[in-house]
Image (tube, helix red, strand yellow):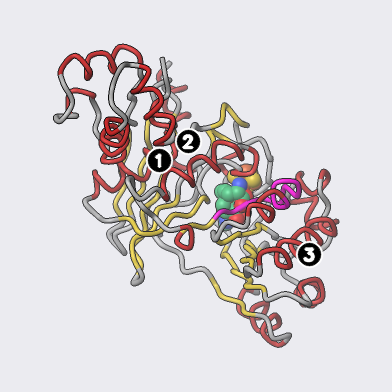
Amino acid sequence: MIDIKSMSLEEITVLLKSMGQPAFRGKQVFTWLHKGVSYFEEMSNLSKPLREALAKDCALTPPQVVYKQVSKLDGTVKYLWELEDGNCIESVLMQYKHGNTICISSQVGCRMGCAFCASTVAGKVRDLTAGEMVDQVIFTQKDSGLPISNIVLMGIGEPLDNMDNVLRFLELINHGDGMNIGMRHISLSTCGIVTGIDRLAELGLQITLSISLHAPDNQSRSAMMPVNKAFDVEELFQACHRYFKKTGRRISFEYAMVDGVNDSDAQADLIAKKLKGMPGHVNLIPLNDVVESPFKPSKRVSAFQKRLESHGLTATVRRSLGGDIDASCGQLRRKAMEERRANQ
Ligand SMILES: C[S@@+](CC[C@H](N)C(=O)[O-])C[C@H]1O[C@@H](n2cnc3c(N)ncnc32)[C@H](O)[C@@H]1O
Ligand code: SF4
């Protein structure tokens, strides 16, 4: 079956032409797909034979809601979606003053093995297609009734470990005949795959790049993030400087505060030293407790923030949304996997 949801407008137009259709049909089909139809029959301005021919050759596999949790505190909505092959992924919809933001998954699981992260506990199962990433945005908007204006690639998975599909997703979600979400409204977060960061720099997209830094020295970072053994923190900082030089875009550094591991003043000083020469924004994240993780939340978040600010850096503390639901990434999927195992 053809994965039509992952195809560009141009590719769909070529496909429709090969089916003996005029070029404008391509745009009609693309527009329907990005409105979130679940069946080709819903494409009411196409002839019945064409709808049937598309249904015969092309897969349309909207995700199904398995769980939906709505926070009573702030309206954050967390979805656990079941994909066509039975795998589950998460998306979280957060309501901010500047608009509604969706956090989407880029893979089923993750192979990066960060010690504090629930998404990686059972490893990576597979990459998501571009269409499956688009569907998270479209069907969350459809189900919630809330217009989505911002996207963060910060859900389950490592986007730069699935880069081709992620780039295609960006192109599709940005398309004027689709969701039309501007690149400036999209953030991509990576654990630090240097080759991917360099590739992004070459492309010069106007997205915001977030680096999950979590420690500025090799000893602490390697203890938290195995990726640091493939691309160490020196190489990572160099890639960030290259990225800034090439794109002129400010990078955001994510920093989950872990008690006694990455929260010393010396580490704050080292961050400032390493970021010298480029504007950086450090986003301090109060650690979400993950049962399997040996790490505990730091009590020095505010002191660390002040120390960073004393060097002239911008440092913010991430506001925690959805505190009363399983909003931390990967937790809901893991819970569902455990329940499935128990019922087998
Ligand atoms: C789940 S990751 C997905 C994107 C990408 N793989 C990455 O690592 O940046 C998104 C962010 O959540 C953070 N994160 C993961 N587990 C966490 C936890 N237990 N507490 C706080 N932040 C966590 C990650 O470090 C990262 O900054
Ligand atoms: S923090 Fe990101 S890279 Fe690390 S295991 Fe979790 S999802 Fe994967």
Q: Which residue is mark 1?
A: 134
Residue 191, horizontal then vertical, whole percent:
67, 50
**Foreground residue among 175 and 280:** 175
- Mark 1–mark 2 Cα distance, whole angstroms, equals 6 Å
- Mark 3–mark 1 Cα distance, whole angstroms, equals 34 Å
Image marks 1 and 2: residues in contact by CB distance under 8 Å: yes
Left or right for 132, reference 167: left
- Could you classify mark 1 by the number of other residues whose Cα lies within 10 Å: few (under 14), some (14-19), or many (20 or more)? many
- Tell me if residue 192 is in the magenta stretch: yes
Q: Which mark is residue 216?
A: 3
Q: Which mark is residue 130?
A: 2
SS class, disc 3: loop
- Could you classify mark 2 by the number of other residues whose Cα lies within 10 Å: few (under 14), some (14-19), or many (20 or more)? many
Boundaries of the magenta span: 188-198
Q: Quadrant of residue 53?
A: top left
Residue 102, relative to residue 284: is it above or below?
Answer: above
Residue type of the residue flagged with mark 1: Val
Mark 1 lies within 8 Å of ligand 1 (Cβ measured): no
Residue 165, relative to residue 261: is it above or below?
Answer: above
- Tell me if residue 132 is in the magenta stretch: no
Residue type of the residue flagged with mark 2: Ala
Residue 5, horizontal then vertical, whole percent:
39, 31
The residue at 41%/22% (across/down) is 86
Residue type of the residue flagged with mark 3: Pro
The residue at 33%/16% (across/down) is 19
Q: Which mark is residue 244?
A: none
The residue at 66%/35% (across/down) is 111
Residue 46, relative to residue 220: is it above or below?
Answer: above
- Could you classify mark 3 by the number of other residues whose Cα lies within 10 Å: few (under 14), some (14-19), or many (20 or more)? many
Residue 248, relative to residue 131: is it above or below?
Answer: below
SS class, disc 2: helix
SS class, disc 1: helix
